[in-house]
């Protein structure tokens, strides 16, 4: 295979990328042509900030082709276009044959949550001393244990095994299902995992089954999206948000690892799902957003920062127990 290297301005990148795909490029990636110089730009956005730009001021495009002839043909046809006169071809380079599956797998090693609790891809052996293991491979849904927000949630779960034992748990925005599976691993009595993305529902079901967790997803078999749709005996029930039940349905523990903006919007709903004496655990929050989250939940709960990692925070709250009669 051969990579064709081109340079284009920010305004040209999308059009050039589309043209390369039309000219049978197998893939097109875009890099900052000014990387590692004083002109380097940061494009990656964060919650609450303006949307990042689609490309860098000076962008390098790397297009992959089957062979040199296909790359040469594409470059010739592209530069023949009147609108592409300012695009520069910087050369071509051969790409060595590789075992791409093995290469991808090598990027994902076991993730330590605690000394005895690990997230382990299926192609790795569990480390010595790993007493609790979740088998999880990278997939379409968020949550493999590599992100600080996921690790902090899992650390909280491991540290609160006693509170989890026999408890009803809600994982709101379950992604890959890693938090729901973690709660089940640490003794939860019943876990409800919901997400707005049907792909996340499928991923959570598959991951639960791969980890030997008794799970059902009524909607995947034509059932309705209600809390009563899944058998009560099922340890982990998975579905769209309606499965969590009306706000009157309460949970001893509510987990939500999403992002700050949706967490603020969901404040009334998540607070209403929390039972008396229950614990709320929120992640996906940057340190500078902690005060915003406190304010959003203040009418019902007093959020506090419980953990920090790489600029992210874990925030928790506990609802007062119901007064005794």
Image (tube, helix red, strand yellow):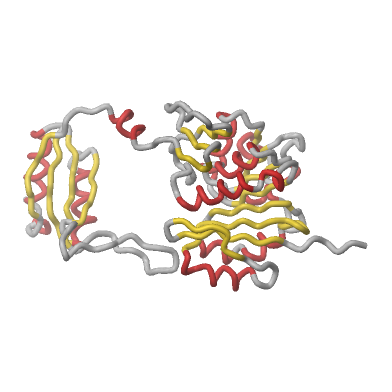
Residue drawn at (44%, 38%) of the image: 139
For the C terminus, the quadrant is bottom right
Picture quarter containing residue 84? bottom left
For the N terminus, the quadrant is top left
Residue drawn at (51%, 32%) of the image: 135
Q: Residue furthest right?
A: 325
Seen in the picture, residue 160 relative to 304 is either above or below; the reply is above
Residue 207 place in picture, x, y as percent: 54, 34
Q: Is residue 249 left or right of residue 86?
A: right
Picture quarter containing residue 116? top right
Residue 157 place in picture, x, y as percent: 61, 46
Q: Is residue 127 left or right of residue 244?
A: left
Query: Looking at this view, is 234 or 156 the one in front?
Result: 156
Seen in the picture, residue 94 relative to 283 is either above or below; the reply is above
Residue 262 place in picture, x, y as percent: 54, 62
Residue 18 place in picture, x, y as percent: 23, 50
Residue drawn at (45%, 49%) of the image: 147
Kindly tell me whether residue 240 is visible in this rendering.
no
């Amino acid at each position: 295979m051969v990579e064709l290297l081109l340079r284009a301005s920010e305004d040209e990148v999308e059009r050039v990328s589309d043209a390369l795909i039309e000219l049978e490029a197998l893939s097109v990636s875009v890099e900052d042509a000014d990387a590692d110089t004083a002109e380097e730009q940061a494009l990656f956005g964060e919650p609450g900030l303006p949307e990042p730009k689609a490309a860098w001021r000076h962008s390098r495009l790397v297009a992959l082709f089957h062979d040199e002839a296909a790359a040469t043909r594409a470059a010739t046809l592209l530069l023949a276009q009147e609108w592409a006169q300012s695009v520069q071809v910087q050369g071509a380079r051969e790409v060595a044959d590789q075992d791409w599956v093995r290469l991808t797998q090598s990027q994902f090693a076991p993730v330590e949550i605690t000394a005895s609790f690990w997230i382990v891809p299926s192609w790795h052996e569990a480390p010595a001393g790993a007493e609790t293991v979740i088998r999880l491979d990278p997939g379409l849904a968020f949550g493999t244990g590599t992100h600080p927000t996921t690790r902090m949630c899992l650390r909280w779960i491991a540290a609160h095994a006693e509170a989890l034992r026999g408890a009803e748990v809600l994982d709101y925005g379950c992604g890959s299902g890693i938090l729901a599976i973690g709660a089940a691993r640490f003794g939860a009595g019943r876990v409800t995992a919901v997400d707005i993305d049907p792909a996340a529902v499928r991923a959570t079901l598959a991951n639960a089954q791969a980890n030997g967790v008794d799970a059902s997803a009524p909607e995947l078999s034509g059932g309705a999206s209600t809390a009563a749709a899944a058998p009560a005996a099922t340890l982990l029930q998975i579905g769209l948000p309606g499965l969590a039940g009306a706000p009157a349905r309460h949970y001893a523990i509510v987990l939500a690892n999403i992002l700050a903006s949706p967490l603020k919007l969901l404040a009334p709903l998540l607070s209403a799902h929390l039972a008396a004496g229950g614990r709320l655990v929120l992640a996906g929050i940057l340190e500078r957003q902690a005060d915003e989250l406190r304010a959003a939940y203040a009418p019902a709960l007093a959020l506090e920062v419980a953990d920090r990692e790489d600029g992210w925070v874990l925030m928790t709250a506990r609802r007062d127990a119901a007064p005794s009669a």
